[in-house]
Image (cartoon, rainbow, N blue to C red):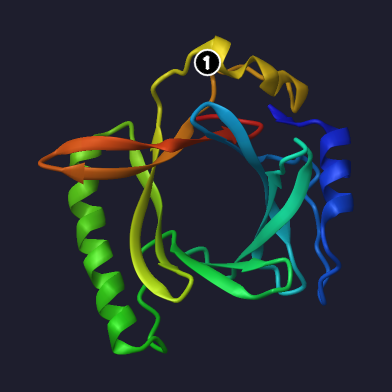
């Protein structure tokens, strides 16, 4: 399963000219986000910049039901990811692995430490087949805690029929997906946003 070539070309044409080069992968995967069952946005992943950082591009569906560029995500160390808008204004930070960089201030270090502790406890609740892939730790200047978990449970085919228009060889029974979650008293609550993971191979 990969994004259709014509879709990738369309999205590439909508991407702003940044002061660095972007290299697209030969096989373009990423994510398709739905909010309350409606198509919300598409993410192209596995791009590279001049420093070989991992790059994700986000495109949202506007009021005219057309795609428009929204944000660029930059991750240089496979752990700390930063999101910027089309003008390269920083707006969010994510933690994708165990990391507390030495250069951070004390408040951010303690915030990340709390998240790592919570990550460990939540992973026990999610079990063997589901797992947390990342946390949003900062948004618009504020410290936040938003966990994203990947689930292996199969989705309903009829809810995603239109994805065939965006993805080659789409098979909803083979893919995984992730959602924002909360866990209280060992009960997992999934949020409304759902992200289909579009990639060529699934383990």
Q: Residue at x 27, y 63 (%)?
A: 115
Residue closer to the observer: 23 or 69: 69
Image location of residue 117, percent across then percent down: 20, 62
Residue closer to the observer: 116 or 142: 142
Dot 1 crowding, Cα within 10 Å, few <14, some 14–19, many 20+: few
* Residue 80 seen anywhere in this rendered image of the structure: no
Name of the residue lying farthest toward the front: 63
Kindly identify which residue carries mark 1: 173
Residue 172 position by quadrant: top right
Q: Is residue 104 left or right of residue 64?
A: left
Image location of residue 193, percent across then percent down: 47, 38
Q: How many marks?
A: 1
Residue 98 position by quadrant: bottom left
Name of the residue lying farthest toward the left: 185
Name of the residue lying farthest toward the top: 158
Q: Residue at x 66, y 66 (%)?
A: 85
Q: Is residue 170 left or right of residue 132?
A: right
* Residue 132 seen anywhere in this rendered image of the structure: yes
Dot 1 lies on which element?
loop
Question: Relative to 155, is 27 above or below?
Answer: below
Q: Residue at x 29, y 83 (%)?
A: 107
Image location of residue 196, percent across then percent down: 55, 32
Residue closer to the observer: 43 or 99: 43
Image location of residue 120, percent across then percent down: 22, 54
Question: Relative to 99, is 195 above or below?
Answer: above
Quadrant assignment for the N terminus: top right
């Amino acid at each position: 399963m990969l994004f259709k070539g014509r879709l990738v070309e369309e999205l590439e044409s909508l991407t702003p000219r940044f002061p660095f080069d972007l290299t697209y992968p030969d096989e373009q995967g990423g994510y398709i986000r739905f909010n309350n069952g409606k198509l919300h946005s598409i993410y192209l992943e596995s791009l590279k910049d001049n420093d070989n950082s991992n790059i994700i591009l986000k495109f949202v569906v506007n009021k005219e039901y057309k795609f428009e560029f929204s944000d660029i995500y930059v991750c240089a160390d496979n752990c700390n990811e930063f999101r910027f808008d089309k003008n390269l204004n920083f707006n969010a930070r994510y933690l994708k692995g165990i990391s507390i960089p030495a250069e951070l201030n004390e408040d951010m270090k303690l915030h990340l430490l709390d998240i790592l502790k919570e990550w460990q406890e939540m992973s026990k609740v999610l079990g063997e087949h589901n797992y947390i892939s990342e946390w949003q730790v900062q948004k618009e200047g504020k410290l936040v805690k938003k966990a994203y978990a990947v689930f292996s449970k199969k989705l309903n085919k009829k809810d995603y029929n239109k994805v065939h228009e965006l993805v080659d060889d789409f098979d909803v029974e083979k893919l995984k997906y992730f959602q924002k979650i909360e866990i209280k008293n060992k009960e997992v609550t999934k949020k409304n946003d759902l992200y289909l993971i579009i990639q060529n191979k699934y383990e």
